[in-house]
């Protein structure tokens, strides 16, 4: 049985968390390599217009996918809680409900993304010179949206039971496929920017299929049975209760980022290409934040289910400090080597200038982003997803959009847009810091649990 090996409720905290987080980190490296390699191929084999087309779609892709990914996080929290409590009957129902839910939402996202691509890109003020290529890339990407959703559901299940190794293996395979197909479609056959998205879609389909095969073949408590994939009302309501706030949180951040991208687009294709290149690099820079956030959510969910409250507190402290330190080291290195990093994508001198200025304005504040995301991950694992949702809705969406709307009118510079990120990360970090030390939830788990039982 793999339960003892995968469980985060036993052993040294630093060791169990790092052993979980390291494969997540490496897996996310390969995940980010998908889009980064797309950008490298189109930038070097096709040109700046194609690179701008890929860059213009990044925020929109994130907006469309993020809500459904948030729902999969909710499923992971429910499964981790039952896994930690060893309530395997309830865990089985939650797993099969999550898969059924992913299939329905994946189909919906595919239809929505393919159908509304031109409308949304025009709403984002994508320049006419790159619009056809943006539409081509975006539509082909969303043709495989169901693979993205199902992959996240499957990975959410595996992470919830402490298995971060198998998703890494499957991502390594699919990334290799993506690289080969990108080089063939874009570099050799010259099929255009849309073919880069086709390569990504095929690769994502492979990774989702490999995860599914593992889940139906594994001999453990989280084994998936095809004939049991259906909705269970109680499990569905729990997944929605935990997942909807995370989905809203993700989507409002994405909506704000779409607004940011719209303002970047207004500076022309050089700004789109340069800032689009930064966004690919930013994805790599945020990987330590992402892996520790996922580790913290799973760690907290499992250990609260097992009623190991002191272990929760120690794990939260360790994971948050590590994430912030690593993120800041990456931020400093990004600042120092910004020109070399941005030029990797083959940008023109003007695009390079935009990208470097954008990066250097943002990257020294990565520690604040790490802190905000870590506390949000802890709260999700504790079943309090509405707190980060409300905070990020107010700060990362409403305030960020308001700031840009006002500030760009007075200072029409790309760095004015760039400062939206450090400012809002700072505000959310202050709010989370106050909540973390003042709120009752972190210090009185036993009493809160007794109160909840008395209400039920």
Image (cartoon, rainbow, N blue to C red):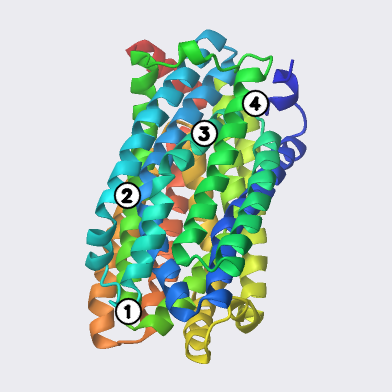
Q: Nearer the viewer, mark 4 or mark 3?
A: 4
Which one is in front, 303 or 413?
Answer: 413
On the image, numbered disc 2 is attached to which residue?
Answer: 113
Task: Quote the CA–CA distance across marks 3 and 2.
Answer: 44 Å
Q: Residue at x 40, y 47 (%)?
A: 143
Residue 255 figure quarter? bottom left
On the image, numbered disc 3 is attached to which residue?
Answer: 443
Q: Is residue 286 above or below residue 240?
A: below
On the image, numbered disc 4 is attached to which residue?
Answer: 214
Which one is in front, 403 or 103?
Answer: 103
Q: Residue at x 48, y 11 (%)?
A: 227
Instruction: List x then y, in percent, for residue 137.
Output: 41, 61
Q: SS for tag 3? A: loop
Q: Is residue 155 left or right of residue 263?
A: right
Image quarter of the N terminus: top right
Q: Residues within 10 Å of mark 4 (few under 14, many from 20)?
A: some
Of the numbered discs 4 and 1, the one sitting upstream in the chain is 1
Q: SS for tag 4? A: helix
Number of marks drawn: 4
Q: SS for tag 2? A: helix
Q: Residue at x 30, y 71 (%)?
A: 262
């Amino acid at each position: 049985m793999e339960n003892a090996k995968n469980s985060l409720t036993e052993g040294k905290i630093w060791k169990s968390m790092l052993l979980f987080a390291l494969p997540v980190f490496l897996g996310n490296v390969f995940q980010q390599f998908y889009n980064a390699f797309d950008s490298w191929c189109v930038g070097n084999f096709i040109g700046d217009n194609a690179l701008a087309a890929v860059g213009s779609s990044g925020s929109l892709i994130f907006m469309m996918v993020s809500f459904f990914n948030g729902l999969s996080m909710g499923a992971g929290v429910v499964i981790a809680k039952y896994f930690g409590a060893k309530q395997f009957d309830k865990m089985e129902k939650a797993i099969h409900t999550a898969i059924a839910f992913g299939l329905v939402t994946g189909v919906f996202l595919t239809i929505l993304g393919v159908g509304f691509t031109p409308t949304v890109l025009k709403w984002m003020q994508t320049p006419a010179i790159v619009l056809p290529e943006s539409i081509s890339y975006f539509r082909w990407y969303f043709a495989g949206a169901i693979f993205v959703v199902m992959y996240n559901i499957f990975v959410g299940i595996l992470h919830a039971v402490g298995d971060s190794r198998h998703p890494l293996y499957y991502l390594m395979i699919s990334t290799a496929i993506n690289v080969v197909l990108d080089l063939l479609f874009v570099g050799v056959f010259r099929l255009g920017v849309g073919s880069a998205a086709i390569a990504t879609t095929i690769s994502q389909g492979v990774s989702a299929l490999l995860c599914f095969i593992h889940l139906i073949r594994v001999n453990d408590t989280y084994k998936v049975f095809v004939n049991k994939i259906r909705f269970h009302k109680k499990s569905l309501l729990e997944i929605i209760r935990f997942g909807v706030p995370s989905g809203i949180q993700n989507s409002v951040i994405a909506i704000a980022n779409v607004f940011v991208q719209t303002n970047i687009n207004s500076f022309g294709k050089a700004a789109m290409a340069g800032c689009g290149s930064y966004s690919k690099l930013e994805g790599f820079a945020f990987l330590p934040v992402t892996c520790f956030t996922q580790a913290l959510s799973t760690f907290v969910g499992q250990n609260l289910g097992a009623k190991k409250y002191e272990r929760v507190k120690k794990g939260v402290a360790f994971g948050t400090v590590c994430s912030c330190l690593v993120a800041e080291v990456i931020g400093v290195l990004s600042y120092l080597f910004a020109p070399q990093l941005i030029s990797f994508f083959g940008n023109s001198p003007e695009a390079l200038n935009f990208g470097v200025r954008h990066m250097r304005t943002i990257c020294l504040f990565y520690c604040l982003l790490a802190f905000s995301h870590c506390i949000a991950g802890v709260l999700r694992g504790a079943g309090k997803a509405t707190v980060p949702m409300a905070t990020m809705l107010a700060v990362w969406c409403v305030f960020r959009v308001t700031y840009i709307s006002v500030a760009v009118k007075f200072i029409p510079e790309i760095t004015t847009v760039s400062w939206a990120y450090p400012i809002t990360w700072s505000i959310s970090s202050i709010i989370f810091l106050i909540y973390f030390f003042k709120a009752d939830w972190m210090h009185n788990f036993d009493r809160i649990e007794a109160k909840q039982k008395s209400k039920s």
